[in-house]
Amino acid sequence: MIKHLLSVNDLTREDVVRILDTAESFREVGTRVIKKVPALRGRTVVNLFYEDSTRTRISFELAAKRLSADVINFSTSGSSVAKGESLKDTALTLQAMGADAIVIRHSSSGSPATLTRWVSASVLNAGDGTHEHPTQALLDLYTMRERFGQVDGLKVAIVGDVLHSRVARSLTFALSKMGAEATLVGPPTLIPPDAPAWGATVSHELDPVLPKVNVCYVLRVQRERQRRQFFPSVREYARFYGLSRERVAMLPEEAMIMHPGPMNRGVEIASDVADLPRSVITEQVTNGIAVRMSLLYLMLAGERVPEGGGAHAA
Amino acid sequence: MTGGHPAGTAGGRETRLMDETEIRRATTRIAHEILERNKGPGDLVLVGIAARGDDLARRLAAEIRRIEGADVPVGVLDITFYRDDIGLRADAPEVHETRIGFDVAGKTVVVVDDVLYTGRTVRAAMDELVDFGRPRAMHLAVLVDRGHRELPIRADFVGKNVPTRADERVRVALREVDGEDAVLLGEGPR
């Protein structure tokens, strides 16, 4: 198995299948009275979050704890980072403390890759800038596979702010790796010009796409990234690209609705749509724990690299 | 069905320790012994350790049904996450399915495995099972006991005791996964 997870493209198709298969075992662990196994006893996992993200951090924290690893949460507010410590010095500190894995979320694309140069721990990208969010893509693949039996051949519409979305990038790469077809839907201002090179088709209209998909994946409108005006108003966005009841009626009967959370109800997804049985948003959350357990297990349960060993074991 | 020796023999020839009839007789006898020891099938559950322990557990359940007309629940347990050599092997051990669709609390659990050797697998299974609940009692049934224990563990029900050398290898083939029933002794590690 890979040493670091920086991008979906670090993984072969076989890796993805192994991660999803192992996650299935961890789903079962999540149904037990005691939802905890001793597999990673004595290992230390650090959550290093330079950007707020309650759900991803909690998901990783729960995943590591259910594997019996020790977890340290290192968030930037109130820490040495707030006092001006550089990423490198923080990394060297965590290294000196004996971290076996560092889960990093950072607003700068590529910072997880930079981190691997300084530490011998495994690095897991929990979202870097507008680059990637590979664990989200894997949990989404898991959720699709669970429902449809396989990912190969599925048609997935990814709707919304693709430009700022690391989720959209990682998911598109992952879908094309696994033989599914992604269609990116959004206004021209929110679709990156290089999108066709990701292995996806592009549409600026949602309605014609809906009847042809198995999955409608709704992206969050990232208001906090909305410094420049990418669309005239939230209301206009909701009218053209929001998933309303009327649009849900255009979806095939067995199609499911996904959202990476947190949702803006009434903007990209109507409130009553989010609560439909075919919206699997809470299942995505549950599956996220199992998929992250699978990754931590596969990456950390192998032989330990001796102290002072190089960053690349393979 | 595969003709001759099943695949997967890493060089060298294998001696047949048990054939299909002997395995059948052993499972029938163990089923009787379990019922005798437990005074019937009440509160009895079988948990087989993957792989092959689960197939043996299903065979024992079929025997118990034949003898007593009662259905005994069968679960399958994968002990990977409870192994004591995690971190000592190059790659993370492969995981298989665990499915225990019943409550083990208050039950007499018979743990079923194909070969009892060092006892480490059974230790892991015991630790894992108590995380599912608190059984009234746990017993151990194995098709072959080949000795060389590294932990203070013994089997309650044994198909056949086979003295072996540590450098020999005992392999159980079962119809369900290997296409034939046989216990084979060969050269090579494990």
Image (cartoon, coloured by chain):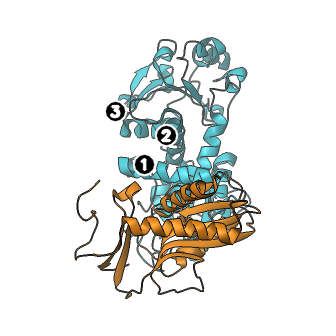
Chain colours: A cyan, B orange
- Picture coordinates of residue A138 (x, y %)? 50, 44
Looking at the image, residue A171 lies above or below residue A70: above
Query: Between A15 and A195, which is closer to the camera in this rendering?
Result: A15
In the rendered structure, which disc, 1 or 3, sits on the residue that comes first in sequence? 1
Do pointers 1 and 3 mark residues of a single chain? Answer: yes
Q: Which residue is drawn at 55% across and 12% down?
A: A250
Judge from the rendering whether residue A63 lies leftward or rightward of residue A16; answer left or right: right
* Chain bearing mark 2: A
Q: What residue type is labelled 3?
A: Ala
Q: In the rendered image, which quarter is residue A264 located in?
A: top right
Secondary structure of the residue carrying numbered label 3: helix
Q: Can residue A301 be seen in this view?
A: no
Where's residue A214, x and y in %? 49, 24
Crowding around mark 1 (Cα neighbors within 10 Å: few <14, some 14 to 19, many 20+) is some
Kindly report the distance in space between the C-alpha atoms of the residues bearing marks 2 and 3.
Answer: 21 Å
Which of labels 2 and 3 is toward the front? 2
Residue A2 image offset from top left, x and y in percent:
41, 60
Give the CA distance from mark 1 to mark 2.
Answer: 9 Å
Q: Residue at x 72, y 59 (%)?
A: B42
Of mark 1 and mark 2, the one earlier in the sequence is 1
Label 3 crowding class (10 Å Cα cut-off): few <14, some 14-19, many 20+?
few
The residue pinned by badge 1 equals A16
Give the chain of mark 3. A
Q: Tell me whether the residue at label 1 lies in contact with that at label 2, contact meaning CB atoms closer than 8 angstroms.
A: yes
Say what amino acid the circle numbered 2 marks.
Leu
Tag in front: 1 or 3: 1
Up-down: is A113 above or below A43?
above
Q: What element carries label 2?
A: helix
The residue that label 2 is drawn on is A141
Query: What number is the disc on residue A197?
Result: 3
Check the picture and name the quadrant holding the C terminus of chain A.
Answer: bottom left
